[in-house]
Image (cartoon, rainbow, N blue to C red):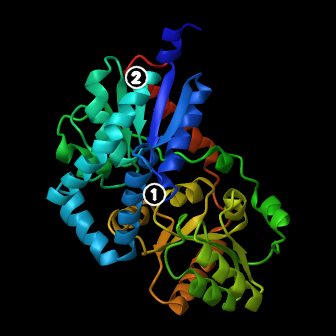
């Protein structure tokens, strides 16, 4: 293969290490492109900015998330309309990211650049003109992409709802936008069935069982929720993600209540989800993973800003309820969901049709730019 051919089949994906949601989407794109013979490289926008700037950006975001009212204010008053503070944040990050991205593309040219992180989308828009022939996509799974996601010289926006299409065109009325199914990682398509999953985990085949998690940061009162649900007689598979404090607290709780089975950061989530009758989680990509396995959702209202918008959309998609505040009320809601699930019968397995629709959407997007071979 010649150097030119290699470039024609090379894709660069820009993610961001704020939680796992961006990486999940980037990995799904990476897998699909690799199946079509593409060479792919996945980079973290925050790390490309350099240790100091990247760490500062992450700390600022975590600080905002720890104060939900403050993040709500920043999201709805700054990010949505593209206010002065939001534009300042974009310019500040681009000051570090653009030179690094320019150097990356000069050293290893690519035919396709996919940004699954708003900071990456801003930087890609600034370097596109310097690389003739470079096709740029932005892939956002939020139901209301905010202003910093949308830039005039982006070739294609990939979104997962009609509402998101309209939000992109709020900022760029002539933007090219494709609505695609939300992809999930390959391990979810290959997850074991309920019987095999329960056998591998030692879960009673006849027991009511829930999976409790809230992203890689483990946001929300998960320990209290796990204890209340366990006290109601339900097996609880509780995942702390990368939250080490939460992982320790769940281990302590499991010693007091045998129905709680704690996990830290784990690659067993597909198996845990298959073993569960109900998934209790925050709004995010976990919802798409649960749906592809036919699992109903009970959603925690613990993610501010875009999380509140996405939660409303998940409710509209169906097979989801919103959890009330307080561990006792949440346990009651979980029991009610489990009763409805039992009455409805075995869940529908949507893996095959979801996977086919996603792959067809990728083919369509590549064909737009003569990149499908």
Mark 2–mark 1 distance (CA, rounded to whole Å) = 27 Å
Crowd around label 1: few <14 · some 14–19 · many ≥20 (10 Å) = some
| Residue 335 figure quarter | bottom right
Whether pointer 2 and pointer 1 mark residues with C-beta atoms closer than 8 Å, the reply is no
Q: Is residue 306 left or right of residue 191?
A: left
Q: Earlier in the sequence, mark 2 or mark 1?
A: 1
**Whether residue 278 is visible:** yes
Q: Position of residue 173 (x, y in %)?
A: 17, 39
Q: Position of residue 188 (x, y in %)?
A: 65, 50
Residue tagged 2: 106
Q: Residue at x 84, y 70 (%)?
A: 202
Q: Which mark is residue 18?
A: 1
Q: Residue at x 47, y 16 (%)?
A: 8
**Whether residue 110 is visible:** no
Q: Give the number of the mark in front: 2 or 1.
A: 2
Q: Is the residue 279 above or below the residue 20 in the image?
A: below
Q: Residue at x 38, y 59 (%)?
A: 56
| Residue 127 figure quarter | top left
Task: Please tell me whether mark 1 sits on a helix, a strand or a loop.
Answer: loop
């Amino acid at each position: 293969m010649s150097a030119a051919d290699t470039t024609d089949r090379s894709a660069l994906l820009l993610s961001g290490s704020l939680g796992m949601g961006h990486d999940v989407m980037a990995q799904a794109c990476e897998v699909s492109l690799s199946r079509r013979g593409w060479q792919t490289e996945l980079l973290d926008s925050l790390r490309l900015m350099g240790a100091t700037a990247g760490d500062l950006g992450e700390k600022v975001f975590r600080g905002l998330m720890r104060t939900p009212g403050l993040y709500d204010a920043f999201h709805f008053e700054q990010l949505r309309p593209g206010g002065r503070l939001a534009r300042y944040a974009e310019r500040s990050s681009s000051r570090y990211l653009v030179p690094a991205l320019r150097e990356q593309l000069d050293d290893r040219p690519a035919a396709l650049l996919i940004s699954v992180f708003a900071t990456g989308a801003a930087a890609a828009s600034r370097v596109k003109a310097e690389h003739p022939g470079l096709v740029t996509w932005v892939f956002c799974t939020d139901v209301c992409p905010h202003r910093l996601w949308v830039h005039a010289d982006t070739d294609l926006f990939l979104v997962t709802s009609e509402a998101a299409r309209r939000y992109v065109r709020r900022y760029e009325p002539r933007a090219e936008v494709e609505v695609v199914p939300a992809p999930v990682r390959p391990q979810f398509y290959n997850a074991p069935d309920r019987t095999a999953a329960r056998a591998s985990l030692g879960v009673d085949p006849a027991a009511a069982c829930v999976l409790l998690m809230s992203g890689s940061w483990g946001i929300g009162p998960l320990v209290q929720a796990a204890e209340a649900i366990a006290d109601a007689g339900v097996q609880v598979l509780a995942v702390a993600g990368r939250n080490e404090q939460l992982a320790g607290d769940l281990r302590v709780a499991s010693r007091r209540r045998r129905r709680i089975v704690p996990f830290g950061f784990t690659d067993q989530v597909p198996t845990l989800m298959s073993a569960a009758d109900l998934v209790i989680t925050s709004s995010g990509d976990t919802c798409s993973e649960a749906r592809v396995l036919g699992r109903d959702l009970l959603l925690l209202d613990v993610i501010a800003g875009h999380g509140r918008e996405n939660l409303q959309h998940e409710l509209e998609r169906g097979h989801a309820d919103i959890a009330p505040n307080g561990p006792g009320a949440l346990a009651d809601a979980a029991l009610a969901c489990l009763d409805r699930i039992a009455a409805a019968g075995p869940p529908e397995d949507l893996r095959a049709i979801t996977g086919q629709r996603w792959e067809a959407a990728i083919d369509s997007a590549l064909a737009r730019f003569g990149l499908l071979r």
